Image (spheres, rainbow, N blue to C red):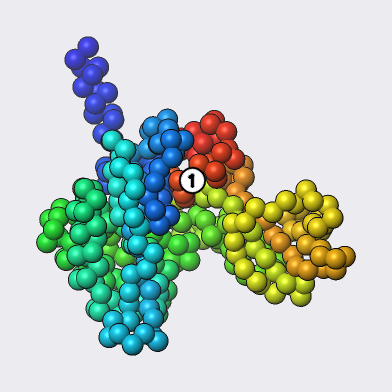
């Protein structure tokens, strides 16, 4: 029996297959929390418990660039989260900071302040942290600035937490470039299309937007987890098919007087007083689409990638059955 137990323990420690195994702490299912107030509902707490979610990636704040401010500090934090309810027992918080490409060009101005701000927020809210994740849509023109920022901010954070690790979101287009020097990346398989383009079918998730980048996955030299969407939204266009807004309003598409279906299953004509007022494209992520993308990406990577859902919202998650959610994480 001792031998069997030993073999079991050894087996549990084996890394997932693939060329670039994940750090042990990242090889777990997770979920993003992307709101400005941290207040978990009972159903959200139950979701974490039922699906054995051990990692909660919590967006702390954004860093944006404001060239018009009279202040000498052009890069400022916005949308800072406020914690109203405690973190569930057994759940690790990973602070996440979103940085705009414009701001990252000026990283020297805010790197030290940002590190101190993360630490202060964790201290004030009694949150222990061992990892910080950065989210930036960097390109070839901002790559050097972003990579230097990653090195500098880790050095600053190590003053507070000597063993701290840095992770980063990886967008599909970034797979074609050299990865940043981080412990691992979270591959964002959501927001894959151009929502401002009237011709787009589904900007949240569409296999045709993912396929061009599959060729980079097997040899991408960075351990990866996989982030998948669970949300929906509406994209509004004028009668001339020009982009107007992106929102999460609830439209009653069953109102046949106001909303008329077009030849596209998720696009509606909104009528007012018998005249075309605007078009509304409703986008969502079906369980089938999510699972198809997960399977296809994992196959291209030749590795089983742990999943992080974006994001924790009981209303959005209620669209899926318990069995479907289990398959997302399995």
Report the label total. 1
Viewer-side residue, 72 vs 136: 72
Horizontal arrangement in the rendering, residue 159 relative to residue 38 (left or right): left
Vertical position of residue 60 compared to residue 228: above or below: below
Q: Position of residue 195 (x, y in %)?
A: 61, 65
Label 1 sits on residue: 313
Q: Badge 1, how many Cα within 10 Å: few under 14, some, many 20+?
A: many
Horizontal arrangement in the rendering, residue 305 relative to residue 20 (left or right): right
Q: Position of residue 71 (x, y in %)?
A: 30, 85
**What residue appears at the point 39 percent right and 64 percent down from the top-left corner?**
79
Viewer-side residue, 302 vs 102: 102
Tell me, yes or no, if residue 145 can be seen here.
no
- In the structure shown, which secondary structural element does the residue marked by tag 1 occupy? loop
User: Which residue of the protein is positioned furthest toward the right in this rendering?
Assistant: 274
**What residue appears at the point 20 percent right and 59 percent down from the top-left corner?**
120
**What residue appears at the point 32 percent right and 38 percent down from the top-left corner?**
88
Viewer-side residue, 90 vs 327: 90
**What residue appears at the point 32 percent right and 77 percent down from the top-left corner?**
75
User: Which residue of the protein is positioned furthest toward the top in this rendering?
Assistant: 1
Vertical position of residue 5 compared to residue 132: above or below: above
Vertical position of residue 149 compared to residue 191: above or below: below
Q: Quadrant of residue 109?
A: bottom left
């Amino acid at each position: 029996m001792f031998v069997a137990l030993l073999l079991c323990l050894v087996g549990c420690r084996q890394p997932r297959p693939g060329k670039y195994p994940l750090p042990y702490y990242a090889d777990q299912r997770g979920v993003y929390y992307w709101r400005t107030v941290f207040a978990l509902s009972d159903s959200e707490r139950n979701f974490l418990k039922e699906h054995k979610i051990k990692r909660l990636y919590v967006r702390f704040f954004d860093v944006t660039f404001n060239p018009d401010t009279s202040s000498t500090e052009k890069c400022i934090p916005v949308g800072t989260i406020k914690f109203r309810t405690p973190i569930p027992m057994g759940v690790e918080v990973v602070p996440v900071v979103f940085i705009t490409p414009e701001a990252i060009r000026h990283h020297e101005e805010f790197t030290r302040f940002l590190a101190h701000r993360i630490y202060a927020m964790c201290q004030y809210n009694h949150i222990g942290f061992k990892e910080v994740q950065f989210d930036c849509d960097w390109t070839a023109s901002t790559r050097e600035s972003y990579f230097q920022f990653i090195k500098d901010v880790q050095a600053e954070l190590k003053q507070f937490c000597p063993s701290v690790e840095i992770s980063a979101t990886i967008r599909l287009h970034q797979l074609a470039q050299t990865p940043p020097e981080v412990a691992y990346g979270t591959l964002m398989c959501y927001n894959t299309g151009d929502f401002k383009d009237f011709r787009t079918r589904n900007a949240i998730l569409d296999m045709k937007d993912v396929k061009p980048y599959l060729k980079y996955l097997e040899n991408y030299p960075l351990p990866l987890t996989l982030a998948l969407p669970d949300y929906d939204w509406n994209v509004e266009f004028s009668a001339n098919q020009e982009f107007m807004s992106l929102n999460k309003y609830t439209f009653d598409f069953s109102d046949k007087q106001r909303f008329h279906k077009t030849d596209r299953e998720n696009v509606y004509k909104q009528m007012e007083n018998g005249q075309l007022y605007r078009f509304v494209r409703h986008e969502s992520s079906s369980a089938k689409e999510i699972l198809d993308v997960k399977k296809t990406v994992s196959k291209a990577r030749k590795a089983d990638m742990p999943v992080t859902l974006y994001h924790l919202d009981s209303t959005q998650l209620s669209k899926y059955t318990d069995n479907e959610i289990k398959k997302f994480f399995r």
